[in-house]
Image (cartoon, rainbow, N blue to C red):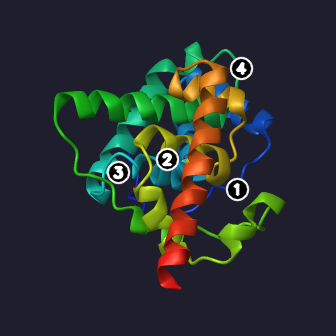
Amino acid sequence: MAVVGVRGIGRAVDPPDEGDALLIRRIAHGDRQALTDLYLRHRQALFHYLLQFTSDDGVAEELLQDTLVAVWKNARSYKGDARVLAWLFGIARRRACKRLRRRELPQADLAELETVPAEDPEPEAALLASVTRAEIAAALAQLAPQHREALLLAFVHELSYAEIAAVLEVPLGTVKSRLNHAKRSLRAVLRAGEEAEQ
């Protein structure tokens, strides 16, 4: 199975999940084209997510390849109780954590977040609207890794709390707590940066 490298970072367009579920069923029956189609739909989101675990594009691409091999081997295990994208993030995370246990990965460079497409600001994001992407990336770098990961899954990849809980393999309450703490911490870091500039 040949999978091309990914350099573009950003959110994947989230196609209807029925299409993704159909691709998984086709993969489970040995359809290699379905695996290629699934890869093309979600490569950017998965690659961007894997960059949290390493700053080395090559290692992130290897992890993406490992993820696709795992999807090929385990497509029959997909039960349909979560969106396919959330299931893919769970597989990618397990692959990255397994690799981290084997050897230390280079730390992710959060400056890469500067290339993530902007979203329309939510009412809570008034403070974020006044800062640059570089300032947000620097502020995210100061958060605990589990808080940063939860924020990115929620706001960049737009997973629901339940999907984040499944990806991280933690209770729903833990996800809510992490996101609440992460948002407060991020606001505090950004405000401190604004005050330092004045």
Q: Alpha-carbon distance for marks 1 and 4? A: 20 Å
Name the N-terminal-most of marks 3 and 4: 3
Q: Nearer the viewer, residue 154 or 76?
A: 154
Task: Give the percent coordinates (x, y) of residue 169.
Answer: 52, 20
* Amino acid found under the numbered disc labelled 1: Val
Q: Nearer the viewer, residue 16 or 182?
A: 182
Q: Alpha-carbon distance for marks 2 and 1? A: 22 Å
Name the N-terminal-most of marks 2 and 3: 3
Task: Give the percent coordinates (x, y) of residue 35.
Answer: 54, 38
Residue 106's disc number = none
Position of 69 compared to 57: left or right? right
* Residues packed near mark 2 inside 10 Å, few (<14), some (14 to 19) or many (20 plus): many
The structure residue drawn at horizontal position 34% and vertical position 61%, both measured from the top left corner, is: 109
Q: Alpha-carbon distance for marks 2 and 4? A: 27 Å
Frontmost of labels 2 and 1 is 2
Q: Secondary structure at mark 1?
A: loop
According to the picture, the residue beneath numbered tag 1 turns out to be 13
Name the N-terminal-most of marks 3 and 1: 1
* Residues packed near mark 4 inside 10 Å, few (<14), some (14 to 19) or many (20 plus): few
* Amino acid found under the numbered disc labelled 4: Gly
Frontmost of labels 2 and 3 is 2
According to the picture, the residue beneath numbered tag 4 turns out to be 80
Position above or below: 76 against 6: above
Q: Alpha-carbon distance for marks 3 and 1? A: 20 Å
Confirm or deny contact between disc 1 and disc 4 (CB under 8 A): no
Residue 61's disc number = 3
According to the picture, the residue beneath numbered tag 2 turns out to be 148
